Image: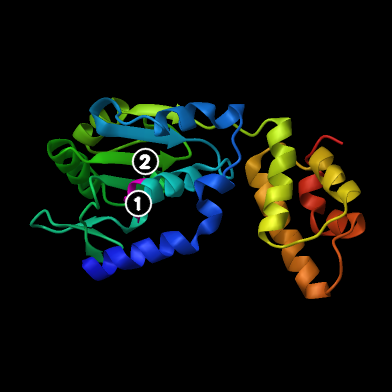
Amino acid sequence: MAKYQAQLALDLQRESRFSASHFIPGGSNAAARHWLSRDAWPEGRLWIWGSAGTGKTHLLRAWAARHQALVVEADTLLCDEQGEIFAQGLPFHPIKGAVVLDHLDRLKNEVALLHILNRSQAEGVRVLMAARFPPARHHFALPDLASRLRATLTAVIDEPEDDLRATLILSLLAERQLVVAQPVTEWLWRHLPRTGEALVEAVKRLDAAALERGGPITRQLAQEVLSDMLSSASI
């Protein structure tokens, strides 16, 4: 387990792009940031929700690094017949009184999550969770789990506002070390769908296309690579 914890610490250090200093604050994520800054939450639980690309995983991992918390992908949770919980193939043990469960939309084992919530509350372990939707919009087969999650404090991250979108485009490009002329970035800002997910996908495609062709990212390249996305945007 010590080896596992050490590896987690190394992984968090490598993921510098998920550090608190790299997160772009805005009105759309103010509620989530407010609750993450608190020393305690009702029942010791907090559920962050919002669309893909709005920064949920970034906030979770920055919080986990600050609190030396165990980070677990929800779809890796398992529970055996003796009630032993496993996460990512290893016995589950929270680190320093906090655990982070990401992508609850992908949860496969409700019994494991119920055990985690019960044990965490009994032992004073804080549980930070994230998904695309709030608990009330998820269907949980276990009544006890549904009841606990619907009583959990939630905070939404909305789609980024215009100022945040403009900064986010530049941040995503810089993260991939892509140099793009200002007229092109402004054109992207105006014509891409107004969601964080669209920005992430667009920069990913542009990076792949620029690498494949060995040339700069131009407006012509963007129009070609992002044609299906641009057709649904307001131009």
x, y percentage for residue 12? 43, 59
Residue at left 22%, top 49%? 112
Q: Nearer the viewer, residue 74 or 68?
A: 68
Disc number placed over residue 74 in the picture, else none:
1
Judging by the rendered image, the residue that carries numbered circle 2 is 129
From what the image shows, is residue 182 above or below residue 205?
above
x, y percentage for residue 20? 51, 45
Side (left or right) of 8 relative to 114 = right
Numbered disc in front, either 2 or 1: 2
Say which quadrant the C terminus sits in.
top right
Side (left or right) of 107 relative to 174 = left
Amino acid type, residue under disc 1 in the picture? Ala
Q: Which image quadrant for residue 211?
A: bottom right
Q: Is 182 within the magenta?
A: no
Q: Is 69 within the magenta?
A: yes
Q: Nearer the viewer, residue 228 or 187?
A: 187
Side (left or right) of 61 relative to 54 = left
Looking at the image, is mark 2 or mark 1 earlier in the sequence?
A: 1
Crowding near the residue tagged with mark 1, few <14, some 14–19, many ≥20 C-alpha atoms within 10 Å = many
Say which quadrant the N terminus sits in.
bottom left
Residue at left 41%, top 29%? 35
Q: Say if mark 2 contacts mark 1, CB within 8 Å.
A: yes
Amino acid type, residue under disc 2 in the picture? Met
Could you say whether the residue bearing mark 2 is in a helix, strand or loop? strand
x, y percentage for residue 131? 44, 41
Tell me the magenta residue range. 67-74
Residue at left 31%, top 63%? 88
Could you say whether the residue bearing mark 1 is in a helix, strand or loop? helix
Q: Which image quadrant for residue 203?
A: bottom right
